[in-house]
Amino acid sequence: MTDHNPGWKAARSLHPGGVNVLFCDGHVDFIQETVDPTVWRGLSTRSRGEVISSEAY
């Protein structure tokens, strides 16, 4: 897949400071706009086996 439109992977929200994200297990968390990009990418994968503490976001 070619990345012609980088906006497809961006979450957007009108909430100040971040975005509410629905996870595949059904829970919702507020992700701060200051989240580290490595953590953000790790939250969106399952195949790499990252273990991410909720304190990271």
Image: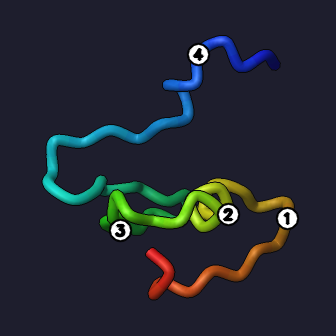
At 41% from the left and 41% from the top, the residue drawn is: 11
In the rendered image, the quadrant that contains the N terminus is top right
Above-or-below relation of 8 to 17: above
Query: Disc 2 versus disc 3: distance between alpha carbons?
Result: 15 Å
Query: Disc 2 versus disc 4: distance between alpha carbons?
Result: 20 Å
At 45% from the left and 65% from the top, the residue drawn is: 35
Q: Position of residue 47 (x, y in %)?
A: 84, 60
Instruction: Tell me the amino acid under the disc marked 2.
Output: Gly
Disc 3 target residue: 29
Q: For label 3, count other residues whose C-alpha is less than 10 Å away and answer few (under 14), some (14-19) or many (20+).
A: few
Q: Are marks 2 and 1 in contact (CB under 8 Å)?
A: yes
Query: Disc 3 versus disc 4: distance between alpha carbons?
Result: 26 Å
Instruction: Tell me the amino acid under the disc marked 3.
Output: Asp
Q: Position of residue 55 (x, y in %)?
A: 45, 87
The local secondary structure at tag 4 comes to loop
Look at discs 4 and 1 and give the one toward the viewer. 4
If you read the primary sequence from the N terminus, does the residue marked by circle 1 or circle 3 appear first? 3
Instruction: Tell me the amino acid under the disc marked 4.
Output: Asn
Disc 2 target residue: 42
Disc 1 target residue: 48
Disc 4 target residue: 5
Residue 30 shown left or right of residue 17 in the figure: right
The local secondary structure at tag 3 comes to strand
At 44% from the left and 74% from the top, the residue drawn is: 57
The local secondary structure at tag 1 comes to loop
Look at discs 3 and 4 and give the one toward the viewer. 4
Residue 13 shown left or right of residue 53 in the figure: left
Q: For label 2, count other residues whose C-alpha is less than 10 Å away and answer few (under 14), some (14-19) or many (20+).
A: some
Q: Are marks 3 and 4 in contact (CB under 8 Å)?
A: no
Q: For label 4, count other residues whose C-alpha is less than 10 Å away and answer few (under 14), some (14-19) or many (20+).
A: few
Look at discs 2 and 3 and give the one toward the viewer. 2
At 55% from the left and 34% from the top, the residue drawn is: 9
